[in-house]
Amino acid sequence: MSDASINTQANDGEAGFGDYFALLKPRVMSLVVFTALVGLLAAPVGVHPMIAFASVLFIAVGGGASGALNMWWDADIDQVMKRTASRPVPSGRVTADEALAIGLTLSAFAVVMLWLASNAVAAGLLAFTIFFYAVVYTMWLKRWTPQNIVIGGAAGAFPPMIGWAVATGGISLESVLMFALVFMWTPPHFWALALFMNSDYEKAGVPMLTVTHGRRSTRVHILVYTILLAPLAIGAGFTAIGGPIYLTVSAVLNGLFLLGAVKIWRRDEDVAGADNYRTEKSFFGLSLLYLFLHFGAILAEAALRPFGMGGW
Amino acid sequence: MSFREPHELHKRRSGRNIGLGLVLAAFVAIVFGMTVVKVTRGDMEPPRATPTPQEAGS
């Protein structure tokens, strides 16, 4: 038997460790870790560092598991889109069956371990999040309605609520406001991306708002959601998770975000095409900073509280 | 005696095995750490059905 024949046989399903890790969508996981950690630390109840670390890790694993299930189901459309074609399943490095098995196993593992580490409310919320992302968003809404991003955004908004539940064992106004912040932020963030990645979604047949209702309507939607987001984000500053730092950061960011949304609304396709969607791309970049700094400010308020400085 | 250069495939397989080994070791460490915290805080103690004499007297 020659070396060549050995290799041909063994190459099937021989993905590297990094390929399996990529299945868990590490970039999404980093957002999950950050917002869950902020939710946990902003809660009025202290958590032992070991329990906090383990809980956030299991929340991240749960988020990763739903990412693997998403890649299993969406392998056909991921293959068509430039942005997702190099993912482990569409590129052939990991089989769809493996993605399904890993997704299901890690989902159950993460929920059970989070329950053991913290409490049933947090574990229940994690289970619901995985179900929402994998079934409600990926299998049902994504290919069916242009509002996919709006409703599906809820899945990404749950982690701070889960973090809060790890500490308190329940749900409160503050945790719902953190949920609402991410929930309302998601549509303008993704629609800005869709404006300059439109051809990708069109090719894959995903009913993005840009495809079904046109770009003019998408620009209006971005503005409306940004206007609705602003009072919500600033309003959270007057609750127990807010304080002077949060309020200042939120006021500045919402001002800039609104300004960006107005600019997007006033532009038409000719102008946007001429400068290669510069405003849309910078709005998308700002949206990432927007969420990071809002949660960073909540974290800062929580971190300063023991020294008598954070909060109101 | 000379050993043949390991093929890229074997390197990948070895990397996967080492990665999985490290993940399992980390999992054992986390479960151990969680158990220590929960046992020392008294989370694992069964609830008492009847109050102790001290509790009853107070």
Image: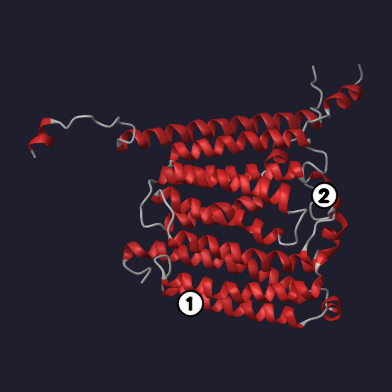
Q: How many residues crowd around disc 2 within 10 Å: few (fewer than 14), some, or many (20 or more)? A: some
Q: Does A2 appear above or below B21?
A: above
Label 2 chain ID: A
The C terminus of chain A, quarter of image: bottom left
Q: Which of B51 and A76 is in front in this view?
A: B51
Q: What amino acid type is highlighted by mark number 2?
A: Ile
Q: Is A301 situated left or right of A250 in this image?
A: left
Q: Can residue A259 be seen in this view?
A: yes
The location of residue A16, given as percent across then percent down, is 74, 35
Q: Where is residue A252 in the image (x, y as percent from the top left)?
A: 55, 78
**Quarter-wise, where is residue A181 in the image?**
bottom right
Q: Quadrant of residue A283?
A: bottom right
Which residue is denoted by mark 2 in the rendering?
A77
- Residue A260 position, x and y percent, is 67, 78
Q: Mark 2 or mark 1, which is nearer to you?
A: 2
SS at badge 2: helix
Q: In this view, does A43 lie above or below A300?
A: above
- Residue B42 image position (x, y, % from top left): 30, 35
Q: Inspect this view and state whether residue A23 appears.
A: no
The disc placed on residue A248 is 1
Position of residue A224 relative to residue A97, above or below, is below
Q: Earlier in the sequence, mark 2 or mark 1?
A: 2
Image point (85%, 60%), residue name = A202
